[in-house]
Image: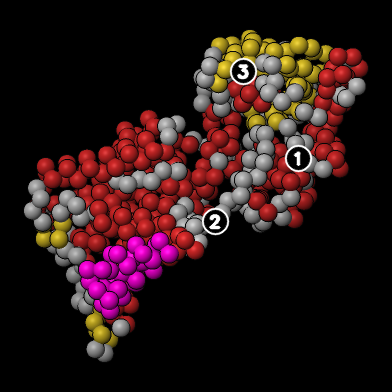
Amino acid sequence: MALLKVEDLHVYYGSIHAIKGISFEVNEGEVVTLIGANGAGKSSTLNTVAGLLKPKSGSVILNDKSLVGIPAHKIVNEGMALCPEGRRIFQQLSVRENLEMGAYTSDVSRLEEDIDKVYTLFPRLKERYKQIAGTLSGGEQQMLAIGRALMSHPKILMLDEPSMGLAPILVSQIFDIINRLHEQGTTILLVEQNAKMALSVANRGYVLETGRIVTTGTGKELLHNDSVRKAYLGG
Amino acid sequence: MLSYFINGISLGSVYAIIALGYTMVYGIAKMLNFAHGDVIMIGGYMAFCSTAYLGWPAIPSVLFAILVCTVLGVIIEKLAYKPLRDASSLAVLITAIGVSYFLQNAALLIWSSNPKAFPNMVKFPNLVIGDIQISSVAIVTIIACIIIMIVLTLFTTKTKMGKAMRAVSEDKGAAQLMGINVNATISMTFAIGSGLAAIAGVLLCSAYPTLMPTTGAMPGIKAFTAAVFGGIGSIPGAMLGGILLGIIEIFAKAYISTQLSDAIVFAVLIIVLIVKPTGLLGKKISEKV
């Protein structure tokens, strides 16, 4: 049974019909990716699932509970964490304070233990825990953003363009981390422009084009699909 | 000379406490709450009524003023500003000016335009060192300002709510994703700012004991100037800006001209903004993509 089930989702920005009836599902323990060009509606989809955007119609169901209409700040409690596009860490807070914000709704008694877990995953953050987050490098900021999202013990972790703006070596580091989280059993919904990397770590993928899903399949199938190769993988 | 300096710090402390309200609200809600000065006036009237009419002692009447202003601040935010959360900043600004007039005219209806003599709330004798006399009100004001600064700094750096406030002021969307209730945080900020305004109102009226419906307007504008001077959005900036402004004003009054002192204060602001547009401690936030 699907952990997250999105059905016939329609989202508008004013009069612009950005998402035109998207349906997809993510099963427990899976890494699922949404790929597509700029403006295809990938981020809008994640933002709608996370409650930052309100859909016109359609349903978002996590663990048999509908999330539509729940304000964004309460959706965290339902077990969903979004690591947003552009990282959006709190630049003027310290690394540790950023992690504390990630645990805003969680049990205080588990705070130290959870922070230690993130430090084990990202030893660099431990070295810099006192530093103001805005002074971290791009890769470190992305690690912090992922670590912050993990602090709420999400049932499903949504990553929006985690490789954006990073040097190739850091991109592969980030994907290593995604692989590691996958092995630990974390369910991940990944949005990426780097389709090749995304499909190589994903169990399944969906291809979005101008607000619609045009193709779906396992990561391997899509990697070898001719039209996907032409459009997103450079031939 | 020294007594001017202390008077300056004392007046500056009042500006600083008011400026904190401006700067915190600006930091979180990204709006200039021009009704803030009038909340000061309401605070003054509340303390006045509870002592002069009800005969309450100083401490309970100050607490009463704080309570009323805190509630008032939250109500103003809910009724006037919250519906405009997504509106243009100009619309919010005009609304704030409207709220300011509303409060002034409400006070005019209730208490009339006759100045009220504010009762002396600070019952300690003045401090005399050699031939310098320091008024007890000045001492209380400075101490209050220091305590407020320490408590606020601890609040924003040590408590969960305070850290959440800083997070909201930086990125509302990301804060929501953390599970922070942005609306509640904004209400909280208005509550704190308005509570501080009540304290400022009592201190101001103790130093200059005439209370009118327009009492809050000028200090409000000056404290706003102080907040911009120090760097709007920055808590230490508001403190520094307020105190410097108070000192400049008192010295300008003493050595240059009483009439021109306000002009001098605003001229200093203009110069600072030309040289350093973000204010003394204001941070220039570079947008990273």
Please tell me the numbered disc located at residue A165. Answer: 1
Dividing the picture into quadrants, the one containing residue B251 is bottom left
From this view, report whether residue B106 is shown above or below residue A55: below
Query: On the rendered structure, is A27 left or right of B64?
Result: right
* Extent of the magenta region: B242-271
Q: Quadrant of the C terminus of chain B?
A: top right
Can you name the residue that lies furthest to the bottom here? B130
Tell me the subunit letter for badge 2. Answer: B
SS class of the residue under badge 1? Answer: loop
Q: Is residue B258 magenta?
A: yes
In this rendering, position of residue A215 left or right of residue A9 = right
Dot 3 amino acid type: Ala
The answer to whether tags 3 and 1 share a subunit is: yes
Name the kind of residue labelled 1 in the image.
Answer: Gly
Tell me if residue B136 can be seen: no
User: Which subunit holds the residue at mark 1?
Assistant: A
Q: In the rendered image, which quarter is residue B11 located in?
A: bottom left
Residue bearing mark 3: A18
For the residue pair A38 and A102, the one nearer the viewer reads as A38
Return the x and y of residue B186 as percentages of the image width and height.
Answer: 43, 40
Q: Secondary structure at mark 2?
A: loop
